[in-house]
Amino acid sequence: MRELIQCLQLSNQTVTEKQTIEAIKNAGFNGAFVQWYNDSTLEYKIELVKACRAAGLKVPFAHLGYDRINEIWKADGAGDEVLSGFIRDLQTLSDLGVPKALVHVSSSEHPPKTSEIGVERYEKLCVEAKKLGVRILFENNKVKGYLEYIFERLNADNTGICLDAGHCHAHFKDDFPWETLGEKIEELHLHDNDGSCDQHFLPFDGSVPWEFYIRELKKCGYSGAITLESRYYDKYLTESVEDFYKTNLRNILKPHLKNLGLTKLM
């Protein structure tokens, strides 16, 4: 059986980190991935990784910050600062034994144009990551063409793609370059929305065509974990955090996966 991973999304201030981690574990997940964002202290992020492991959850990857990711593509010193910060993050992840780091390729609906200096910075990131034993996974976001541009030019063998189905549905109308980049998919972010924006609903709670994604993932031989990135917030707050993960994600989602044949992926 494939590993079942849940994003450690701490967007609800009424639930503690400990309660969230326990709820994820009790629901039957094998692991959690940590948001390695800039608005949290390094000590806090390290403690989250340790708390997940203490609860018996694996931490297969961390999501690097993206609030300044557009600077990567610009020809000024700000992009070098972002790169240096990422390299420091990779050192910490390596020390913690976290094997993969996720990077958004851009942010916002109007990011800077792709550029050679952006690819050069990402290549430097991959070089440093390889020294540290960390793989870099690029994640599709809001604008097409960035993944293709990077992989057409990047000279690195420790890279892959995290396919975010929610982003793909909301921003690309489910259009993804399966034939050229499908075999590079190493991780998934599965969550739903109504097609208008990135809402992080539970799978099957929006309009994502899951049959289509399952079919395409089978075609490209996907062999990674099943990772859910639904958020406990807004309309879901009528139930407890335990019920959100256990009843919805475990007991309701898995029968759907079985009916769609996704258990063969798991």
Image (tube, grey):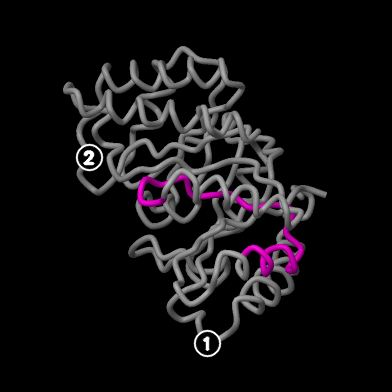
15 relative to 145, above or below: below
Numbered label attached to residue 111: 2
188 relative to 16, above or below: above
Q: Is residue 155 left or right of residue 53?
A: left
**Residue 164, x across and y down, in percent:** 49, 48
Q: What residue is pinned by disc 1? A: 238
Q: Magenta segment range?
A: 21-40
Q: Nearer the viewer, residue 94 or 264?
A: 94
Question: Badge 1 local density, few (<14 within 10 Å), some, or many (20+)?
Answer: few
Q: Which residue appears at 58% of the width and 26% of the height?
A: 134
Numbered label attached to residue 220: none
79 relative to 110, above or below: above
**Residue 41, x across and y down, in percent:** 42, 48
Q: Does residue 229 show up magenta in the picture?
A: no
**Residue 204, x across and y down, in percent:** 57, 69
**Residue 202, x across and y down, in percent:** 55, 68
Give the alpha-carbon distance from disc 2 to disc 1, as whole Å. 37 Å
Q: Nearer the viewer, residue 249 or 211?
A: 249
Q: Nearer the viewer, residue 163 or 39?
A: 39
Q: Is residue 61 left or right of residue 85?
A: right
Q: Is residue 190 left or right of residue 74?
A: right
Comparing marks 2 and 1, which lies closer to the viewer?
1
Q: Is residue 220 left or right of residue 109?
A: right
Query: Does the CB distance between marks 2 and 1 fall below 8 Å?
Result: no
- Farthest-out residue, front: 43
Question: Badge 2 local density, few (<14 within 10 Å), some, or many (20+)?
Answer: some
